[in-house]
Image (spheres, coloured by chain):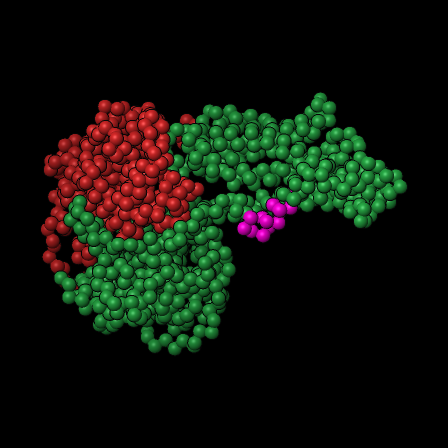
Amino acid sequence: MKGTATAEEAAELTVSDLVVDYPIGRRRHRRAVDGVSLSVPAGRAVGLVGESGSGKSSVAKAVLGMAPLSAGRITYGTTVLNDLRGPARPQDIQVVFQDPYSSLDPTKTIGYTLQEPLRAHCARTGRSLSAAARDELVRAMLAKVGLPAGTAERYPAQFSGGQRQRISIARALILQPRLLICDEAVSALDLSIQAQILNLLLELHLELGLSLLFITHDLSVVNHVAEDLVVMFRGRVMESGSAELVYRQPQHPYTRQLVMSAPMQDLEAQRARRERREALALPPARQAPLGEACPFAHRCPFAVDRCRSERPLLRSAPLGGQVACHLAGELPPWSDEHTQPREATGSTTSCP
Amino acid sequence: MTTATDVPVRRRGVLRAVLATARGRITAGFLLLLFACCLLAPVIAPADPLHQNLQEILRTPSGAHWLGTDSLGRDVLSRLLYGGRSSIVGILEGVAAQLVVAVPLGVATGYLGGRFDRFVMRLADIVMSVPVIVILLAILAIFDHSIAAAMITLGVLGASGMMRIIRGTAMTVRQELYVSAAELLGLSRTQIIFRHILPRCRGVIIVQTSLFAALAIGIQTGLTFLGLGPPPPAATWGGMVNEAATTLSTQPWLLAPSGGLIALTVLALGVLGDTVRDVTAQNHTSSGGLRVKPARRRPDVAQAPVPEGTALLSVRDLSVSFLTPRGEVEVLTGVGFDLDAGQTLGLVGESGSGKSVTARAVLGLLEANGAVTGGSVIFDGRDLTRATRRQLAALRGTRIALISQEPMVALDPSFRIGSQLSEIVRSHARLSREAARRRVLELMEMVELPDPEEMAKRYPFQISGGMAQRVAIAAALAGSPDLLIADEPTTALDVTVQADVLALLRRLQRETGMAVLLVTHDWGVVADICTHVAVMYAGQVVEQAPVEQVFGAPAHPYTAALMASSPEKAPRRTPIDAIAGAVPPPGAHPDGCRFRDRCALSAAECADDDIPLVRLNEERVSRCIRTELLQAQP
């Protein structure tokens, strides 16, 4: 609590060799996360990016104690989180989910929703906090996320998606956590609202020193917020490193394809991106089964036989960072349209 | 705070909401009155229920006996009131027994799940398979005609049904993210159950309770009718029906008070349960449930001028209104744009801008509570807003096709992809089975589906979202349309798949020369595929121009602000130029310029009048009277 709590030191979140299997039916299971390691040092913003089915949200769930761990170790500072459930978990780690509608109890006022964690916390620690002090904390938190004080008396149904997401952020922050996990926290929002929420998260991160694990499928969003990037595909880490490097100089063919596929808000740049992508495009192919192979082999324009028979391990990449590719360093160099603008190619009309 | 109502409204409690409806008031009032009268029977009953007067048997209603007398001359009204006491006590006992068993078990199994859940559910299965009536007869024999024992037994045995329903609700609530959030914030399971799970189950509990009460009355009446309850002369409703049945031929009236009251009570409980269900279902939505009723059918729209242009699709002054619980709301105001063959027009805007409604209105596919209230949609020289349903149906699929955001929704999960496509192909042209199959494979190859032969044999749930969108595009192409309306076709897809689908659309357009109306919120998609853009804000087109001009220099402050709010446009880890506030909801648009409250360039004159579209050059219009200021900015 403000003023009363002992200033707890922020700690590093470490995930090592995480494996998450979801049961399907009786004996079978689906491997959602396959040996993922990453860390979020105190006060740092780490982006976890991947497409649907990449396992990025399963990593978040595992960190939050909401997914079954088959193997691996998750630690926060010196605390091992693997088997901690419920109130035993450190409240230093909080989350903002994607869906602003399911995130708030429709039967409770916003004030109640925000006070509840305070009450539970007081009950747990035996500290007493008067109703007035709780009200004050809630009002301060609502102000911090940019909502008027009258918000506390209202119900979630009276708020728009962007406002609900602000309320979710306020609830996550009310116990003054040190690490905020944002699981596609801005993906369901309109562009102008997304910008507002990103600004808010960035401000909290920069001013309060809040660590962020920012999970999204949107490269431009994660590149804006994160200092480090981890790229996942089919449950495995394909590439990791500083965001600047991974986004500007992707070294894994999958990351390259991801960057080339994201349409840019600029005619010339997008044209260049599209042409480069089309030059490398393969016909759509069925996903090869996972196993002792590179998960991207079936879609990789550079794949060789070895990629289909031997699993590439994450290793230090030539330009820095880490990459899980047998051909790292042997790939054609990547020229980026941001830093090296191409010459204008005549007319920009793209239709016949 | 633009979307929340300005007066803080407290959510009404279930009880108050029920009483706000007429049927809620009537049924609750009736039950309450009945309850009070039976409770006060010793005070208000006109006579002793056991007092016999053999001189006045089987009388019809009179001043002395409001409901007549029975075969022993006893006052029927008094007997009904006294009999009601035992019925109500019986119901309460049964309901209490059921709630005590069903609620804790239902909530616990639903929330905790696991082994405990499986054990309790197997037990419930066993209980459900037991014939209740046999048990009840045994109980009555053992406990010496004690209705209380029978009702409590009935409550316990009947609890398995209620428990299942509560468990189902609790399981749904458990999936809600706010339950996960509460767990992470350190709430214990007990706290979560009482604060978050149980309140959401309240509705089903009330409904189930009222239905069970109605059932209990029936069963109790049946038992007393059979003489299994308190022995005569004690007054019971079932006993009274029994007596009335024996004298049915001499005095049919006697059946009316007892039978009627039982029927009314059961009916009132049932209707009350329904009312509670309706009320709780709409309680958590801001709209309070949408009434589906057509807004005013387009009234006498002044005869639109004959289309002057040569555009394939020409939308002029299109206005659309929806009927909502708050009244009629205008969602589109004077929307207009042109689209020619071979062009791709991007309809860009945030949610609430009306871009999807525009696309639906062009197709004549507005929801039942919406209607075109003005303007025209000229497609190939014909006004679609005046076309009959049949004419529209003939156009859809053949001349105009639609692909939507959710390709899976467009496909029927119970049929193979090949047969669905074949059905569509054969609806467009009379083809033999074999010819249709060839056409289907051709279409599937056209949209680059790998291994068409094998793919045709699959069901929609066996393919990925990207593949499903390709199938949807194949279906749209089956009629060789001149105009393809694509409503956020790639929004639900991964970026790599999105790029593939956009490449496919571009290729198909090049080959067929069709026009595409693309609804999107993504400037990147616009940059990738569109030739023209119409930017929408709060139900109006605010700027329309070829893409080069819009990306080069936006001519409307909203266009500029929306483009600037992309994270791409800001240096890394610095604040983005976000637009403050939110899109005003339909019905709450400010006067004058609808964007002025959020606009950096707004001035006093922006509030004066409706802002007209200002023509900037041959191909470009902007709904801004200060656009030259924007152009002057660096």
Residue in view at x 42 percent, y 32 percent? B192
The colour chain A appears in is red
Q: Quadrant of residue A56?
A: top left
Residue at figure coordinates x 41%, y 70% from the top left: B374
Q: Is residue B65 above or below residue B579?
A: above
Question: Which quarter shows the C terminus of chain B?
Answer: bottom left
Q: What is the x, y in percent for residue B503?
A: 27, 54
Looking at the picture, does residue A50 appear above or below residue B338? above
Within the image, what quadrant is residue B354 found in?
Answer: bottom left
- Seen at 14% across and 50% down, the residue is A338
Magenta segment main secondary structure: helix
Is residue B44 shown left or right of residue B98? right
Query: What is the display colour for chain B?
Result: green
Q: Which image quadrant is residue B123 in? A: top right
- Which x, y percent locates residue B12? 48, 47
What percent of the width, then of the height, locates residue A151?
Answer: 35, 47
Tell me the magenta residue range.
Answer: B19-31
Taking the magenta stretch, the answer to whether it contains residue B20 is yes
